[in-house]
Image (spheres, helix red, strand yellow):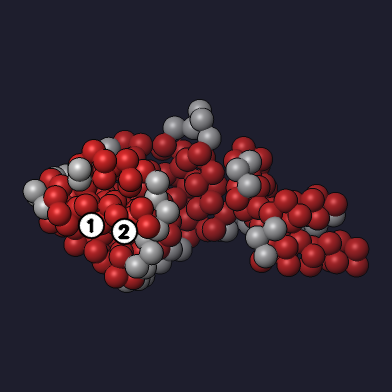
Amino acid sequence: YSNCSASNGRSYAKYDLEDYRGAIQDRNKKINPNDAEIYYKLGYSKFASGDYREAIKDFNKAIQINPDYAEAYNNRGLAKHHVEGYVYTEAIQDFNKAIEINPNYAEAYNNRGVDKALLSGDYRGAIQDYNKAIQINPNYTKAYYYRGNAKFYLQDYIGAILDHSKAIEINPNYAEAYIGRAFAKLQLGDKYGACLDLSKAGELGEGEAYDMIKEFCQ
């Protein structure tokens, strides 16, 4: 028991330090078979290192032990989103369950919105989820960004600019939001403003911004 506890303690420390490979190796040595959190964090470590199929197996185990583990459903949904062969509805079902367990789970609303938008083109449904995520967490930068993208696809370019601007207000280093805002500005004929945003995105490390500058700003 003491060896198992020591191993679990080390793996938590490595998890906190985002030393994912070390966390996986540590937890695989000794795992308490009835500890849902250990399986959840093991799954999260595998997810973070890109091993999505194995992450799903660990999230499955965490849910088997604790059927009300909202975070395990949410992250299993995220993992399914990355695995070829899973249809988007399977991920959405996991987000639905996470929200059912915790109706104030802003991240699950945001993730469900992303899947609705990207995988089925349900931009209006996605916006409803982003709205809920923002209602729960008014400083949820990603929710503003993704809502801005959804509004762009619905040709609400002013709304898209407002959302991307809010994301930038919260996080001035959010390069993707500058690119999103630039696209919307281009649609409204604001080439100068768009090029300023693309330049800022490039400064923040978004290499594709420079390709867009060559295309739109020369």
Residue located beneath label 1 in the image: 196
Residue 200, which numbered label?
Answer: 2
Kindly identify the amino acid type of the residue bearing the numbered disc 2. Answer: Lys
Q: Do residues under tags 1 and 2 come within 8 Å of each other at their CB atoms?
A: yes
Q: Can residue 64 be seen in this view?
A: no
Q: Which residue is drawn at 91% across and 63% down?
A: 3
* Mark 1: secondary structure: helix
Q: Which quadrant is home to the C terminus? A: top left
How packed mark 1 is, by other alpha carbons closer than 10 Å (few <14, some 14-19, many 20 or more), is: some
Q: In this view, does 142 lie above or below 126?
A: below
Q: Residue at x 67, y 65 (%)?
A: 17
Q: Is residue 172 above or below residue 178?
A: below
Q: Which quadrant is home to the N terminus? A: bottom right
Q: How far apart are marks 1 and 2 (CA)?
A: 6 Å
Q: Which residue is drawn at 16% across and 44% down?
A: 154
Q: Nearer the viewer, residue 162 or 57?
A: 162
Q: In this view, does 184 lie above or below 214?
A: below
Residue at the outermost left position: 189
Q: Nearer the viewer, residue 88 or 51?
A: 51
* Mark 2: secondary structure: helix
Residue 130 point in image, percent of width and height: 30, 57
Residue 166 point in image, percent of width and height: 26, 66
Residue at the outermost top position: 85
Q: How many marks?
A: 2
Kindly identify the amino acid type of the residue bearing the numbered disc 1. Answer: Leu
Residue 37 point in image, percent of width and height: 67, 60
Q: Is residue 32 visible?
A: yes
Residue 56 point in image, percent of width and height: 61, 43
